[in-house]
């Protein structure tokens, strides 16, 4: 059994570049979540998918951010025109149903220079 | 709207001493409450959760937490700290099947030999 995986684990980019992260949830988990965690803070909810449908988005998710889950399996989170304030850990989580535990991946640490 | 306040960003205890990490929540509806642990460079791992029923919840690694509605608290305790307990601990709240889980800022636990 594999847990939630995220790729890459670390990403360093220059301001203004676009970056894309991938999350592979636990198989058969229909719900998938993205969070952002900055230093010294807890994770902040960004967006949520049920199967391929993006059902909820936080106000934190500016128009430079876009997330997809095209086939209801893996998901991608893209940040366009990165800014230094985007530097954070981006966490993905999945769960099997509304009342089940969320399982978190190890995160992708983004550094914007 | 739900929110979580974790009192104390850093807690230091001696090995073998009681661990007490404080969490207070705010919720307009009956809450679901969670404690997660995060080790360096790893994702979050669920320690325990309260949904309904018994207010004293036992989790992994000897941790437990008690839901006190009158005090809007969900403090995490462990009778005897172990060196391996050193990590960041996050309290979180969500509504019944709300997918918007709100995390506290975290408490870093240090265990001294």
Image (spheres, rainbow, N blue to C red):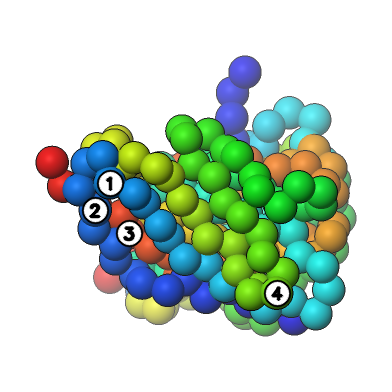
Marks 3, 2: nearer the viewer: 2
Above or below, B58 against A63 in this view is above
Find residue B70 and name its label: 4
The CA distance from mark 1 to mark 2 is: 6 Å
Q: Chain of mark 2?
A: B
Q: Which residue is mark 1?
A: B17
Q: Which residue is mark 3?
A: B108
Asked if marks 1 and 2 fall on the same chain, the answer is: yes
Q: Nearer the viewer, residue B104 or A68?
A: B104
Q: Is residue B34 left or right of residue B90?
A: right
Q: Which residue is mark 2?
A: B13
* SS for callout 2: strand
Residue A31 position within the rendered picture, expressed as x and y whole percent measured from the top left: 78, 47
* SS for callout 4: helix
Does label 4 or label 3 sit earlier along the sequence? 4
Marks 4, 3: nearer the viewer: 4
Does label 3 or label 2 sit earlier along the sequence? 2
Q: Nearer the viewer, residue A86 or A38?
A: A38
Q: Residue at x 64, y 45 (%)?
A: B57
Q: Residue at x 75, y 81 (%)?
A: B1
Does label 2 or label 4 sit earlier along the sequence? 2
Q: Are marks 1 and 2 in contact (CB under 8 Å)?
A: yes
Does label 3 or label 1 sit earlier along the sequence? 1
The CA distance from mark 2 to mark 4 is: 28 Å
The CA distance from mark 3 to mark 1 is: 16 Å
Q: Are marks 2 and 4 in contact (CB under 8 Å)?
A: no
Q: Chain of mark 3?
A: B
The CA distance from mark 4 to mark 3 is: 26 Å
Marks 2, 4: nearer the viewer: 4
């Amino acid at each position: 059994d594999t847990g939630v995986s995220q790729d890459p684990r670390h990403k360093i980019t220059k301001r203004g570049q676009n970056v894309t992260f991938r999350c592979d949830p636990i198989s058969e988990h229909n719900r998938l979540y993205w969070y952002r965690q900055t230093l010294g803070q807890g994770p902040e909810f960004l967006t949520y998918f049920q199967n391929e449908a993006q059902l909820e988005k936080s106000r934190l998710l500016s128009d430079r951010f876009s997330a997809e889950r095209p086939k209801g399996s893996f998901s991608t989170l893209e940040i366009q025109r990165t800014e230094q304030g985007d530097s954070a850990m981006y966490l993905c989580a999945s769960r099997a149903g509304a009342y089940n535990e969320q399982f978190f991946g190890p995160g992708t640490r983004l550094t914007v220079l | 709207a739900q929110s979580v306040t974790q009192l104390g960003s850093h807690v230091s205890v001696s090995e073998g001493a009681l661990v007490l990490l404080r969490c207070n929540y705010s919720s307009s509806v009956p809450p679901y409450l969670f404690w997660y642990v995060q080790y360096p460079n790893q994702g979050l791992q669920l320690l325990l959760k309260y949904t309904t029923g018994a207010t004293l919840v036992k989790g992994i690694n000897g941790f437990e937490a008690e839901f006190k509605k009158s005090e809007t608290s969900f403090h995490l305790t462990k009778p005897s700290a172990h060196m391996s307990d050193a990590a960041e601990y996050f309290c979180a709240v969500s509504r019944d099947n709300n997918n918007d889980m709100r995390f506290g800022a975290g408490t870093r636990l240090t265990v001294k030999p």
